[in-house]
Amino acid sequence: MEFSINHPVLFLLSGIIVAVVLAQSVFFLIMAWRRGMKLGMSKQKLKKVAISTAIFTIAPAVAIVLGVIALAKDLGIALPWMRLSVVGALTYELPAAENTLSAMGMKLGEVSNLTASQFVTIASVMTLGIMVGIWLLPLIGKKLQNGMINLENRDKKWGDIFQASLFMGMISAFLGFVFCDVSTVFVGDTSGLIPVAVMLVSMIVMIACGFLMKKFKWTWMGDYALPISLLVGMGSAIPITAWLG
């Protein structure tokens, strides 16, 4: 049987995995709702939390769909759909697939007729690499949490500084992807400025949301500021890319 990156068997296997994840989401949603009712939370408050959370997931979901589209040409639809629907992250899946293809002498976006062994190699790198966090958490998660609690108990100020440092470290890792190709501008290629411009647009929108919250007392916008900034930022990528190329 000839291998195909869009074979029905791959869709069946991926669909089963995604269905299990969706079932878990529904289960924990019901459990959380029941727990909230037991704690005395009103249905109106629970409904507000559920709606704001659902809206909050729209922007990341759009980014994930774009990631599936970006990978679908080379890897088919089933694998990216499954990876980005479970524990996959867009900031990981694209570099993982690109680096694996590069090691095989191929380039993302220019692949045709992957063999079964090549497909399995790419899927293994994408899957096993991101599972390191899942394996490490049971081993060191409790120790890290207890260490941070002990630090806060001894000195709350340094505890806050430590947590802020961890957060900034995570943000710095993502900023590396934003600025990694800026140097191409020195050789006449302005495409490396596209991520920077998109980030600036998102930042301006976030600041504008904060201004509106403060100026007009729109406290409700606090739940939607991040999704709005993400959606506007992603939308701005289209004209910015056409401009900077």
Image (cartoon, grey):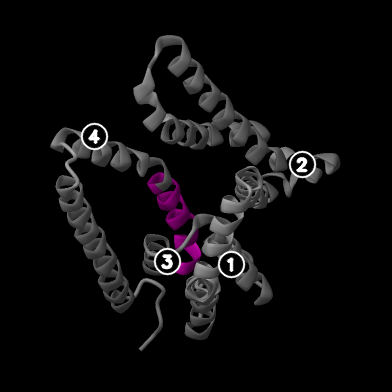
* Residue in the picture at 54% in, 56% down: 149
Quick one: which residue is furthest to the front in this view?
Answer: 154
Residue holding disc 1: 96
Nearer the viewer's eye, disc 4 or disc 3? 4
Segment colored magenta: 61-76
Work out whether residue 154 can be spotted. yes
Mark nearer the N terminus (4 vs 2): 4
Q: Which one is nearer the viewer's eye here, 71 or 49?
A: 49
> Where in the figure is residue 216, as x and y percent of width and height?
41, 10
139 vs 5, nearest the viewer? 139
- Disc 4 or 1, which lies upstream in sequence? 4
Residue 14 % position (x, y): 32, 71
Q: Distance between the residues labelled 2 and 3?
A: 32 Å
- Which residue in the protein does label 3 denote? 83
User: Residues at badges 1 and 2 in contact (C-beta under 8 Å)?
Assistant: no
Q: Front-most of 6 and 89? A: 89
- Give residue 48's mark: 4
Can you see residue 245? no
